[in-house]
Image (cartoon, rainbow, N blue to C red):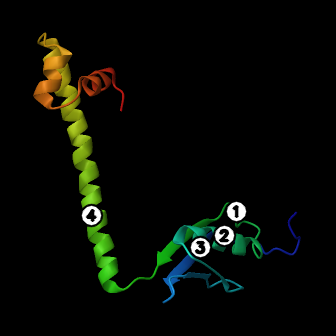
Amino acid sequence: MRDDTLLAGKGVYTAVYSREADGAWIVYVRGHRHEIHSFARSLRRARENIRDALSLWYDDAETATIVDRVELAADLKQELATTAEVARRHTAISKELAVKRRRAIRSLQRSGMGTRDIAELLELSQQRVSQIARGVR
């Protein structure tokens, strides 16, 4: 049951995460009436804990948007940024490949080619060719 003394929520909170020398994650939300903080051994658990901590003070903690700001050393931030860029490009290329494969399979089928030969030409399994032809992802 919720306490009637909870403060009206802000809707959006910024949670700042930092990693301690012992590996624990410290997380806090500032800029509101109360400084709210928590900690955990994993980032996932710290995210859960800060929402729980918010619920002690604000009425919208369960539905509020929490913007995560993870503080890391500059070299680690750069590594994450370059990894995210490669992942973005990979996703775009994967989508393009899926479209190209679907078109190729349809064209080859229309030409009268069988699934086995299409699979051989595209270096896919027969099952995967059948799935793509049926529109299964």
* Quarter holding residue 33: bottom right
Q: Is residue 135 left or right of residue 96?
A: right
Q: Tell which circle, 1 or 4, labels the residue nearer the N-terminal end.
A: 1
Residue 134 versus residue 29 in the image, above or below = above
Tag 4 residue: 85
Residue 119 versus residue 90 in the image, above or below = above
Marks 4,3: beta carbons within 8 A: no
Please name the residue shown 87% across and 75% down the image.
Answer: 5
Tag 1 residue: 62
Distance of mark 2 from mark 1, alpha carbons?
7 Å
For discs 1 and 3, the disc positioned in front in the rendered view: 3
The amino acid on which the numbered mark 4 sits, given as a three-letter code, is Glu
Residue 80 x %, y %: 33, 71
| Label 2 crowd bin: few (<14), some (14–19), many (20+), radius 10 Å | many
Q: Is residue 2 left or right of residue 105?
A: right
The amino acid on which the numbered mark 3 sits, given as a three-letter code, is Ala
The amino acid on which the numbered mark 1 sits, given as a three-letter code, is Glu
- Give the position of the N terminus as an image quadrant: bottom right
Residue 17 x %, y %: 52, 80
SS state under label 3: helix
Q: Is residue 115 left or right of residue 53?
A: left
> Which residue reaches farthest front?
22
Please name the residue shown 50% across and 82% down the image.
Answer: 23
For discs 3 and 2, the disc positioned in front in the rendered view: 3
Residue 84 x %, y %: 31, 64
Please name the residue shown 11% across and 12% down the image.
Answer: 111
Tag 3 residue: 46
